[in-house]
Amino acid sequence: MAKPKKRKEHSKPSNARQVSEANGPYGSGARAKDGSRTASNERKQAEERLQQALAEAEAARDRIHAVVHSVASGLLVTDVQNQIVLMNAAAEELLGLRFLRVRGRTIDEVLSQGPLKENIAAAIDPHASGAKFDISFDGKTVQAQTSTIRDKSGHNSGVITVIQDVTKEREVDRMKSEFLSTAAHELRTPLTSIRGYTELLATRQFSPEKLKEMALIINTQAERLTAILNDLLDLSRIEGGRKLQLQCSECDIAALAREVAANFQNSSDRHTYTVEQFGTHAHARCDPDRVRQVFYNLLSNATKYSPKGGRIQIFIAGRNDEIECSVTDKGIGIAKADLPRMCERFFRADSSNTAVEGTGVGLSIVKAVISAHGGELKIQSKLRQGTTVSFTLPRRPP
């Protein structure tokens, strides 16, 4: 019998070979390298995301800072302990503080305005809805409005206070109130005169000379009443932002001045009104009624500011492209501090009970009329020496 063949036995790989194969391209060593590389990439990406988030947060903070400090109104932010946490430049200016010096300090320590401190503290109350109020200090009036800051859960986290300087607005409100009272008086005066004289004419007999005198007085008071009403209507147009309408035609400015001066001369024995013309002819294309209104207001002011009487002069000078006009008196004059405000609506240099009569809108209307014609207005005055009001009229308005 044939002997059976021996099966070849495959020899087991050596330990070195096993290790070599284990460290092959798909072994644990490669996996370890890949894992390390992945972790490194993730850390790098996380760092990049963090840097991006920080950059975005920084940019957002810069935008908020720019917005807060660009707001014209003052902004003051306090926390629940009434400590100052934010203040913009406008608030620093209005309150006379510097944020870097008061940050973290309480309003009781740094604010001297009692009503402001009280309202900010009251706004922290859970049931408070804020307040709007005025405070006056250092010669100015400030309007403040408090609002409660609430976090996501609805709890109070502080108070934001908006502060605005309303000194000028409150001054205008005051002048408007005085204007209404003065206007009522100014309207009542000519009406009373007209009513008195017409009643006399209806109940008594007078000589022709006396009748003429009384009729002249009635006519003068009626013109005064008309002028006041026209000023009020023009003021309404100016307040509404509407431009004055002009009905222009070729006019002799000197003739218009003489016409108005003659009317004033007929009603005043203490004043002398003169019109002097220089240079070339004084013709210009303008609205004659508006120019009469200008001369009327200027002569009325010159008369009222010369209570002792005297000479009131009107100068007319024809130039190449314009007419120069001025009205000069030797009256009580205007204080230097009041000159810049003389053309403001409702402003009166002296608003006391002994002040010169008038509504305080005449010069503002004069300026509007001159501006509508393309001219300029200038006022020069010295106390107890008199006043000169000058204006120009282009020969051809724009």
Image: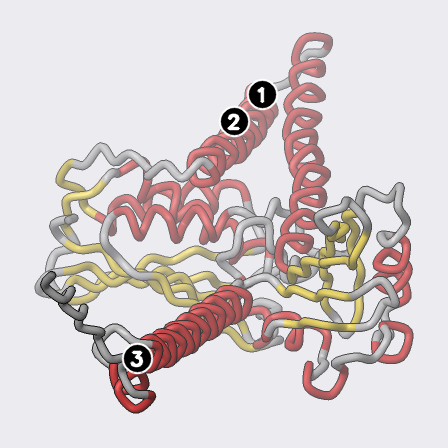
Say what amino acid the circle numbered 3 marks.
Ala
- Residue extending furthest bottom? 16
Q: Position of residue 239 (x, y in %)?
A: 48, 39
Q: Residue at x 35, y 77 (%)?
A: 28
Q: Do tag 3 and tag 2 residues touch (Cβ < 8 Å)?
A: no
How far separated are the C-alphas under marks 3 and 2? Answer: 125 Å
Location of residue 48 (image quadrant):
bottom left
Say what amino acid the circle numbered 2 marks.
Asn
Q: Which mark is residue 219?
A: 2
| Residue 397 showing in the rendered view | yes
Q: Callout 1: few (<14), some (14-19), or many (20+) C-alpha neighbours within 10 Å?
A: some
Q: Do tag 3 and tag 1 residues touch (Cβ < 8 Å)?
A: no
Q: Which residue is mark 1?
A: 211
Q: Earlier in the sequence, mark 3 or mark 2?
A: 3
How far separated are the C-alphas under marks 3 and 1? Answer: 137 Å
Q: Earlier in the sequence, mark 3 or mark 1?
A: 3
| Residue 387 showing in the rendered view | no
Q: Position of residue 143 (x, y in %)?
A: 72, 56
* Disc 3, SS: helix
Q: Residue at x 43, y 68 (%)?
A: 56
Q: Is residue 276 or residue 247 the one in the foreground?
A: 247
How far separated are the C-alphas under marks 2 and 1? Answer: 12 Å
In the picture, which quadrant includes the N terminus? bottom left
Nearer mark to the viewer, of 3 and 1 = 3
Nearer mark to the viewer, of 2 and 1 = 2
Nearer mark to the viewer, of 3 and 2 = 3
Q: Residue at x 38, y 47 (%)?
A: 294
Q: Which residue is mark 3?
A: 22
* Disc 1, SS: helix
